[in-house]
Image: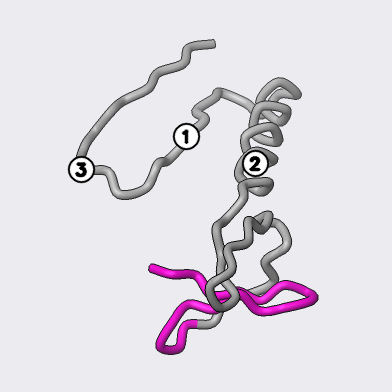
Amino acid sequence: MKIRVEIDNEVKETEVVIRAAEQTNDIKKLYENILRKIINKKIKLFQGATEFYISSASILFLKMMTELLMHTQRTIYLRRI
């Protein structure tokens, strides 16, 4: 297995590509581990002046009005952009 990292200042969003001849258990595990890291990422959100760090997995949906609102099961947070 080879791993390659390319640094490009023009890239706006990091992309991870897994290229393989077939889908093996090792490939599945690698994909699941990467996905778990992404899903469990904390996002800084606000309610008024109070900052909250919310797991991205708890976000149910987003709504863009004059601001970006992120809805969880219990509450709504503001994402400052």
Residue to which mark 3 is pinned: 10
The picture quadrant where one finds residue 11 is top left
The magenta stretch spans residue 72: yes
Residue to which mark 1 is pinned: 17
The amino acid type, in three-letter code, at marker 3 is Glu
Q: Provide residue 1's location: percent of width, then percent of height.
A: 54, 11
Q: Is residue 78 above or below residue 3?
A: below
Eye-nearest disc, 1 or 2: 2
The image quadrant where one finds the C terminus is bottom left
The amino acid type, in three-letter code, at marker 1 is Val
The picture quadrant where one finds residue 52 is bottom right
Q: Provide residue 30's location: percent of width, then percent of height.
A: 66, 27
The magenta stretch spans residue 8: no
Q: Residue furthest top?
A: 1
Q: Is residue 31 left or right of residue 9?
A: right
Range of residues picked out in magenta: 64-81
